[in-house]
């Protein structure tokens, strides 16, 4: 038995050596989450992966940078899966971070993570290599120790190249009830921090979480996986063939559109909605594919609640994490976030206070998981504060509502250098444009002309018009709309360089 163990160690060494030299790693970034637990900063149209929670880079940009910096691996440009509505946010954030993507796969509808990974795996088998190893991760998590992350990935690749399905586990520091848990089995001898995977556990109550913590053989479920594309395809065909069939059809009928790959809507919507854990991982105990869990000690956080945000932010001597124009007097251990105005917190302890242009959240930090209840109530009341911010991002720039009333609305519009709005018209409203800074090229009917700072123009109801920024600095205008209906769906497009639908905003 000693000799056999030695042979296993030698075999493992040479396997890891060959992996370092030849294995191809395809990062798959799943960016379809809604991030409702960080409301009001996170909204449906601008979820948390696009927010700079810490520092100047967004969670998505940090995730992309982390996977392209893995040492000792042949890492291909990341493949990203996102909601079709977020495609320009993804492309712009990758471009501004100077990170190349292999493709951006567009989901026409949310179907959870298992169909998303299936699409990525099938495309990787077609475009890269049948034996390509995928590292699959959410776009909205934080890992502060990139070196430790790289070491965990190396161990996971060792196993994945032997057809293991590998997940990462996080050593629990407290009895957390907001995470799922992984029960570990026997150690894998030729690796430092890897075990057989015994079982997955749902988010527990506090008593059960304490028992997991005391047991010593439970890890938090990170939602990060390493596996061959071919192995995932075989597993999803085995456990949920309806997902495999629907996603394959959505790719066969899909369309490449520049940097994007559009999954066929009808086929993809026919797929069951299921997570990676439910569809495959929780069923692996008696499956033909071996499974393993690798410990990740890299300062991981899912940044999934205001409590977890507080834990990763820099804090003052009183334990307060503040942002913006904040006065915190006799307050401690609180998150106080100001976006647009002064926020004064006096005598507050263990609170979350978040101010945005259209909403203010105040709650005990310990109740962070319940923010989703507010979002559910907003949705039930057909309100829009959970859907988008006052500043709405578009591929050409952004617009922000400044004021509105009966039959009028005022917007601040910013157009990026070289960008152009669609050639369009409105049935119910006229528009007045005043240039605040930059230069505008305006099309109105058959006329095309330039406007400089402090100049203005009028766009009548029914006139075909377009706004272009021909300059090298952002163009800022004030738009005054007037008419019987001012909704964003009153747009008829005739030409659009971003290939948006004719009647969407």
Image: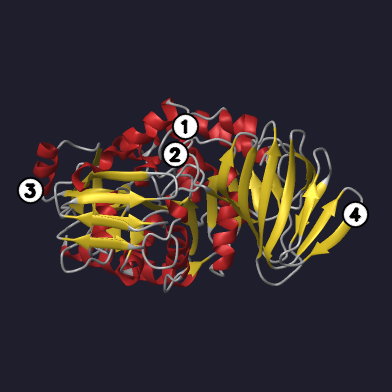
The disc, 3 or 2, on the residue closer to the chain's N-terminal end is 3
Q: Position of residue 84 (x, y in %)?
A: 59, 43
Does the rendering let one see residue 249?
yes
Residue 18 pos. (x, y %): 43, 69
> What element does badge 1 sit on?
loop
Which of discs 3 and 1 lies nearer the camera? The answer is: 1
Instruction: Indicate the secondary structure of the residue bearing disc 4.
Output: strand
Image position of 488 (left or right of 326): right
Going by the picture, which residue comes out furthest to the right?
Answer: 446
Q: Secondary structure at mark 3?
A: helix
Residue occupied by mark 2 = 386
Q: Mark 1 sits on what residue? A: 383
State yes or no: discs 1 and 4 in contact (Cβ < 8 Å). no
The one nearer the camera, 258 or 444, is 444
Q: Is residue 455 positioned above or below 165 on the image?
A: below
For the residue pair 140 and 230, the one nearer the viewer reads as: 140
Of callouts 1 and 4, the N-terminal one: 1
Percent x, y for residue 396? 67, 56
Q: Nearer the viewer, mark 3 or mark 2?
A: 2
Sort mark 3 into few (<14), some (14-19) or many (20+) by Cα contacts within 10 Å. few
Residue underneath mark 4: 447
Say if residue 294 shows up in the picture.
no
- Dot placed on the residue nearer the N-terminal end, 3 or 1: 3
The residue wearing badge 3 is: 214
Q: Residues within 10 Å of mark 1 (few under 14, many from 20)?
A: few
Asked if the residue at tag 1 contacts the one at tag 2, i.e. Cβ–Cβ closer than 8 Å, the answer is: yes
Judge depth for marks 1 and 4 and give the one in front. Answer: 4
């Amino acid at each position: 038995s000693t000799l056999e163990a030695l042979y296993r160690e030698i075999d493992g060494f040479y396997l890891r050596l060959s992996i370092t030299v030849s294995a191809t790693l395809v990062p798959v970034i799943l960016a379809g989450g809604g991030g409702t637990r960080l409301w009001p900063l996170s909204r449906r149209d601008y979820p948390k992966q696009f927010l700079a929670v810490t520092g100047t880079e967004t969670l998505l940009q940090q995730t992309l940078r982390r996977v392209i910096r893995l040492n000792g691996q042949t890492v291909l440009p990341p493949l990203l899966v996102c909601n079709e509505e977020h495609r320009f946010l993804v492309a712009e954030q990758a471009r501004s971070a100077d990170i190349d993507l292999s493709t951006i796969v567009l989901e026409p509808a949310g179907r959870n993570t298992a169909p998303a990974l299936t699409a990525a795996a099938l495309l990787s088998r077609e475009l890269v290599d049948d034996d390509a190893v995928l590292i699959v991760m959410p776009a909205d998590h934080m890992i502060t120790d990139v070196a430790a992350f790289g070491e965990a990935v190396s161990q996971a690749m060792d196993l994945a190249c032997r057809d293991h399905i590998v997940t990462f586990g996080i050593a629990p520091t407290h009895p957390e009830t907001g995470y799922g848990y992984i029960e570990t089995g026997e150690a894998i001898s030729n690796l430092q921090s890897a075990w057989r995977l015994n079982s997955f556990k749902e988010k527990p109550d506090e008593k059960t979480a304490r028992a997991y913590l005391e047991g010593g053989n439970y890890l938090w479920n990170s939602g990060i996986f390493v596996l061959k594309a071919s192995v995932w395809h075989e597993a999803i065909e085995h456990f949920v063939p309806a997902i495999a069939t629907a996603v394959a059809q959505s790719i066969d009928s899909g369309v490449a559109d520049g940097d994007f790959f559009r999954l066929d809507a009808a086929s993809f919507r026919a797929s069951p909605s299921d997570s990676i854990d439910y569809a495959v991982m929780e069923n692996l105990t008696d499956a033909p594919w071996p499974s393993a869990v690798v410990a990740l000690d890299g300062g991981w956080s899912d940044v999934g609640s205001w409590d977890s945000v507080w834990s990763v932010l820099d804090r003052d001597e009183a334990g307060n994490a503040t942002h913006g124009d904040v006065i915190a007097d006799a307050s401690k251990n609180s998150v106080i976030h100001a976006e647009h105005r002064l926020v004064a917190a006096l005598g507050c302890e263990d609170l979350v206070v978040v101010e945005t242009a259209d909403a203010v959240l105040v709650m005990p930090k310990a109740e962070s998981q319940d923010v989703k209840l507010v979002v559910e109530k907003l949705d039930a009341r057909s309100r829009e504060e959970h859907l988008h911010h006052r500043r709405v991002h578009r591929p050409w720039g952004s617009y922000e509502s400044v004021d509105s009333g009966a039959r009028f609305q005022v917007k601040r519009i910013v157009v990026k250098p070289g960008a152009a709005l669609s050639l369009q018209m409105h049935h119910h409203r006229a528009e007045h444009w005043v240039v605040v800074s930059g230069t505008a090229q305006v099309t109105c009917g058959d006329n095309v002309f330039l406007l400089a700072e402090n100049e203005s123009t009028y766009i009548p109801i029914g006139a075909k018009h377009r706004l272009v920024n021909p300059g090298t600095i952002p163009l800022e205008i004030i738009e005054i709309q007037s008419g019987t209906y001012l909704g964003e769906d009153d747009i008829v497009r005739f030409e659009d360089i971003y290939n948006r639908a004719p009647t969407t905003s």
